[in-house]
Amino acid sequence: MPAFSHPSPLGPKRALGWSIVNEARPAATPRLRVRTYELTDPGDLVGLIPAGRPAEDVMSWVRREEGLVGWGRAAAVSTSGDARFADAEEWWDALVAAADVVDEVERPGTGLVGFGSFSFRNSSDEGAALVVPEMIVGRRDGHAWLTTINRTTDQLPEVKPAEAPTGVERTDGALSPAQWRGAVGDAIEYIRAGRIDKVVLARDEIHTADADIDPRWLLARLSTAYRDTWAFAVDGLVGGTPELLVRSDKGLVTSRVLAGTIRRTGSDDHDLALAASLARSSKDLVEHEFAVRSVEAALRPHCSSMNVPDAPFVLHLPNVMHLATDVSGALTDGASSLTLAASLHPSAAVCGTPTREAALVIDELEHMDRGRYAGPVGWIDARGDGEWGIALRSGQIDIENPCRIRLFAGCGIVEGSDPVSEVAESVAKLAPMREALR
C-alpha cells in the first residue's frame, strides 16, 4: 500500500504560510470584524466557492440547497488529545467575546461562524480543527445572507467551474477487503464470547488522481446525487453524511440516529420489500437500539422533555436504506452545540457497546488511524447554535499531496452479522465518494 501521510495538525499549514491563530492561547485572541448582510438568492451555494483555494480552505454544510459555504481563513485553531473539544471551545468563546459583529439577519448561522472537524480518537495524529472563513454565504427558510470577516469588500468572487479528477486509481488501505472480512469474523467471535455487545469496524482505501483533487467537484456531485445528506467540507475532510449527530437551534436539540443498513437494488418494488425486511430484522433492530440508547443517555443530562420514538423509520437514500430515529429534547443547561457534540461522541453508531471495550477492539482489528472519519463535523455560531454531523461517507484529502484522498466506510457488527454481507455493505457505503470522484 502506498504510504499515506498523516501530518501533524500545525506542521504543513505553517509550512505553507497559513495563519493558525492562537493555538488555544487566549492572550493571542484576534479581534475579528464580522459583517452579515441580507443577500438576494445566490443560487447554488456550492457553486459560489471560488477556484484555486487549497482543500483546507473550503468549507461546506449544505443539504437540499440550504446551509452554509465558506472559503479562506480569518482565524483557525488546531487542538488534539483528550481536551480537543474543550480547548477548541475555549478558543471559540474567547474569539466570540473579542469580535466586532454587525449582524443584520440574526438567524442561526449568521454573524460569526466557525466550521469544525474532530478526530474520532483522542490519540489520532489528525486532532481537530475549528476554522473561521473569510467569507460565508448561507441560505435557510427562504432567507439568504453574506458574512465577511476582516474583509474590506463584500463582492463575491468570480467562479470558475470545478473540473472532474482524471486518471483516478484505487488501492487498498490498511486492510484488503478479504483481510477486513476476517477482522469482522474476529469481532463476531468477541461478541459471542461476551467481550462486547456491538462494535463498528471501518476500512479505508486510497484514490490517487493525475492532479490536485478539487473539493468543489466532490461537493457538487454529493449535493446533487445525495440531496438528503449534508455535503460537508472542513480542513480537507469532504463527504456527504446522512447522520446528524446534533442540532441546537434556539433551545431545541435534535439528533438523528442511523444504525442498521441494507443495500438498495434499483428496483422500487424490490427495495420496498427490502425496507420492510429491514424494519423487521432482529439483527438490525438490536444494532439500532444500542445506538439510540447511547444518544439518549448522552443528551439527557443537558435536556428535558426528551422525545425518543418507540420504533425507527426507514430512511431511503440513493444507495442504501437505514433504520433511523430522531431524538429530541429541550435544552436546559445552556450547553453549546459543540459541547453537545462532544457529549455524544462517540455514540454506539460509530464505536459500539460498551464504548471502552468496543474502542479497544477497533484498535486491535482495524489496523489504522481513522483520523477525522466518524468524528463530529459541522459548524457553530456565536450564540452556540449549530449543526454537527458524523463524518461518514467521507474522504480526507492529503494535505501534503492533494492529488490523493483517503476514503472510509464502516459497518456495525453484532452477533447476527455475516462477514460477507458486511463487506458488501461497506462497498455500498463507499459508493457516494467513489462516484463523486468520477
Image (cartoon, rainbow, N blue to C red):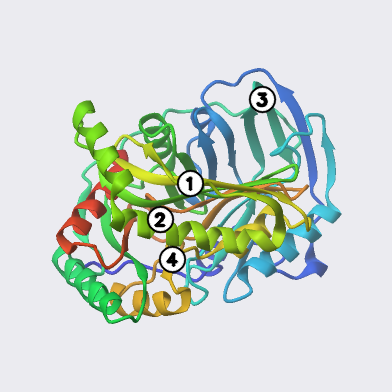
Mark closer to the chain start, 3 or 1: 3
The quarter holding residue 42 reads top right
Mark closer to the chain start, 4 or 1: 1
From the image, tell me which residue sits under label 1.
Answer: 325
Residue 378, placed above or below residue 110:
below
Q: Are marks 2 and 1 in contact (CB under 8 Å)?
A: yes
The quarter holding residue 164 reads top left
Residue at the spot x=40%, y=55% of the render? 288
Q: Where is residue 37? Give x, y as percent.
A: 76, 28
The circle on residue 371 is 4
Mark closer to the chain start, 2 or 1: 2
Q: Where is residue 291? Give x, y as percent.
A: 45, 59
> Callout 2: helix, strand or loop?
helix
Real-space Cα separation, disc 4 to disc 3, in angstroms: 34 Å
Real-space Cα separation, disc 3 to disc 2, in angstroms: 37 Å
Residue 322, placed above or below residue 406:
above
Name the amino acid, label 1. Answer: Thr
From the image, tell me which residue sits under label 2.
Answer: 288
Real-space Cα separation, disc 4 to disc 2, in angstroms: 25 Å
Q: Are marks 4 and 1 in contact (CB under 8 Å)?
A: no
> Callout 4: helix, strand or loop?
loop
Q: Where is residue 171? Give x, y as percent.
A: 20, 59
Mark closer to the chain start, 4 or 2: 2
